[in-house]
Amino acid sequence: MYSKSYFRDSVVKSPASTMISSQVTVPIYSVYIVIAAMLSAIVLVAAMFYK
């Protein structure tokens, strides 16, 4: 947990480090995107069933 927050804070503080730590930040953001897509799909299906 500490390493993820450390890399995220370093990317926010210095944009130049994004190219260096892109191998670490890209998988984290892709996981966030996948989780958001799954939650939105579940919400859409639930809204269709509850109507």
Image: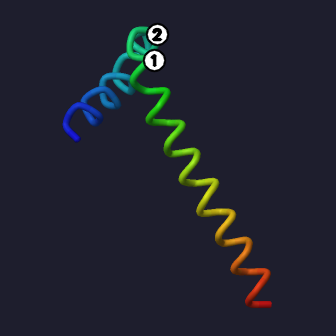
Residue 33 falls in which quadrant of the image?
top right
Residue that mark 2 sits on:
19
Residue 10 falls in which quadrant of the image?
top left
Mark 2 to mark 1 CA distance (whole Å): 5 Å
Q: Quadrant of the N terminus?
A: top left
Indicate whether 24 appears above or below 49.
Answer: above
Indicate left or right for 39 with 10 as reference.
right
The x, y position of residue 31, in whole percent, is: 50, 42
- Say what secondary structure mark 1 lies in: helix
Which of the pair 6/47 is nearer the observer?
47
- Three-letter amino acid code at disc 1? Ser
Tags 2 and 1 in contact by the CB under 8 Å rule?
yes
**Residue that appears at 43% across and 27% down:** 25
Indicate whether 51 appears above or below 42.
Answer: below
Mark 2 crowdedness (10 Å alpha carbons): few <14, some 14-19, many ≥20: few
**Residue that appears at 73% across and 80% down:** 47
Residue 15 falls in which quadrant of the image?
top left
Q: Residue furthest left?
A: 2
Residue 44 numbered tag: none
Indicate left or right for 36 with 50 as reference.
left
Residue 22 numbered tag: 1
Indicate left or right for 42 with 28 as reference.
right
